[in-house]
Amino acid sequence: MHQTGSRGTSSEPDRLLRALGDDDSLVSGLGVDEGTRRALFSAMVRLRSFDDACVALQREGTLPTFFSSRLQEGVICGAAQALADGDAVFPTPREYGVSLQRGVAAEDLAAQILGKASGRQAPCYVSFRSAKVASVSGIIGAHLPHAVGYAWSARVRKTSHVVLAFLGDGATSSGEFHSALNFGGVMKAPVLFLCRNNGVAISTPVARQTASETLAEKAHAYGIPGLLVDGTDAIAVYNAVRTWADAARHGGGAMLIEARTDLLPDRDPIARLERHLMKDNLLSEDAARTIDAEARAEALAAVNVAKGRAAPSRETLFDDVFAVVPRHLVSQRDHA
Amino acid sequence: MSEMNMVQAINDALRLEMRRDDRVVVLGEDVGKVGGVFRVTAGLHEEFGEDRVLDTPLSEGGIIGTAIGMALYGLVPVPEIQFADFIFPGYDQIVSELAKYRYRSGGEYSAKLVIRTPVGGGIRGGLYHSQSPEALFIHVAGLKVVCPATPYDAKGLLLASIRDPDPVLFFEPKRVYRAAKGEVPEGDYTVEIGKARIAREAVPSGRKDDRMVTVIAWGAMLYEAIAAAEEVKKKGIECEIIDLRTLWPLDIDTIVASVEKTGRVVVVHEAPRTCGFGAELVSLITERAFLHLEAPPERVTGFDTPFPYTLEMEYLPLAHRIVPALEKVAGF
């Protein structure tokens, strides 16, 4: 892969891995097939369209809050594309859209975001067991040890499944980040910690999160590999995750990847991949327009279907606290 | 049947269930080769190997968080927290993650595991090896909380806890880990979660000046309640002692039936008084049995201080502090 940076070898975390060069062409020697590159583009456009539809819901007041994944699609879709069906994903709210790529119908995702499914979670704290997407926590970093335990279970149960855990740059300051990387290293669990570093957590810049030069270099303290990837380069993310996953399926262990999404002046991963595909004659302008139009139609239809669904009934408020509704909750449900 | 102490009974339950169900795994600090600082997991590493009995790094949040992940993918983890005092670094994982996983995922996932941890004072452990934090978990929706007082109940309740579909906090009263002995069946049996036990029945004398008191206790304090009951019996006060065994969900029926019979109640617990579980018990009793009460309920508890070292026997609600409370409600 193409590298920028001033020192060290490709295994060192201060080298930024890229698949697309400044001229939008694929770095030679990368065996990323045409179908995968096209699929990546479609997945990103689909996510952007869905995201835009939800942002519109927020602006009209339907959603009180929303975690837009705009400009993060290269990391989200690149990583998801690299996984197999049986692999699990532990997302943060920002990667709600990973479900779309794992077979969840857009209207079912929209229903959870609109509070029309169980209605238990604020927008983007979704979960889809059928797609092996874990439940999103509201506590930053809290899901990371879960990913380790899940991965360890996959290993001792002798499956070939691996686990991808997303996190933002702010999460690297949490205690659970430390616990998870430490446990993941000690247990040699097939888990990938994929950190989207956009340079800021709400208002706090990375320089106020850590004195480390990079986030990826933190991996070394836990005895696991760390890698720095251009997060606006979906093919680079795909390639890095795929390389890790192939090894992890056959005994490899934990790894930390830092995907920078704030480095290049052109931070739009979709525009970047579109230029590349057109340059390689894998995408025409007509085809791009069609993909975009279909994605927007799907997103709008999904949102409308979800809006039309009934909200959960009052009785359901008491379900799922325990496997069986216990007496004190029956009492509160029926006599409050 | 054979006589066991509580450590042996819990060890027996773990071994039995790990043989029966290969999804059950044990993890925690020093639980493996050494068998735990109290030897509760002794021999398990040897029999079941390091994939099922894991010595973990020293991080309670990591232990519980990792166990949650294991539970999400087909295992039934039984993590040990070395002392209940150490559970607070893992408290967020219990409160924000474990207790809410089924609910927040709309029932799609559940994180079923049993957290075992030694609880309570009286072992000269000082501030960080003596506390009783049960109320902090009962308050959190989605957790079951168990605290056996006898070896028989410890084994039967642990087996029931591991097979229960919900997360369970399993508090082991370490002051009586070895002191509490009793007959324990060798094979498989369970003690139902959510059922209290009448540890001592009050027998009405039939006299007009009859004075009966219900005493509610759990864990190591059960034995203090029994000692106090023996003491006041000499003065004509008859105690009915309820060993709660499961703190949540609460067996309120057994409590109400007893209070309706005796008309008086004293709650004993080691934890600090304010917002301790005794407060909830007294509240429920006044809601449900107010017209049967002959006296205001009393609480005999730890003080609203951190747990002390030198003065721990002053802090604990031992029999000599329970006796005056019994006399007070009996003489009201």
Image (spheres, coloured by chain):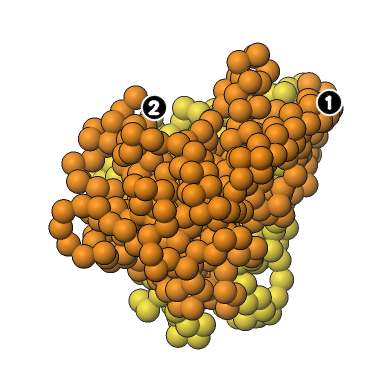
Chain colours: A orange, B yellow
Q: Tell me if A137 is positioned left or right of B36 in this view.
A: right
Q: Residue at x 51, y 40 (%)?
A: A270
Tell me residue A237's x, y (percent): 44, 54
Q: Amino acid at mark 1?
A: Gly
Q: Tell me if A76 is positioned left or right of B141 in this view.
A: left
- Which residue is tagged 2? A202
Residue A308 numbered mark, or none: 1
Residue reaching furthest to the top: A60
Q: Where's the N terminus of chain A, which quadrant?
A: bottom left
Residue reaching furthest to the left: A7
Q: Where's the C terminus of chain A, which quadrant?
A: top right
Tell me residue B202's x, y (percent): 70, 46
Q: Chain of mark 1?
A: A
Tell me residue A40's x, y (percent): 57, 51
Q: Tell me if A110 is positioned left or right of B53 in this view.
A: right
Q: Earlier in the sequence, mark 1 or mark 2?
A: 2
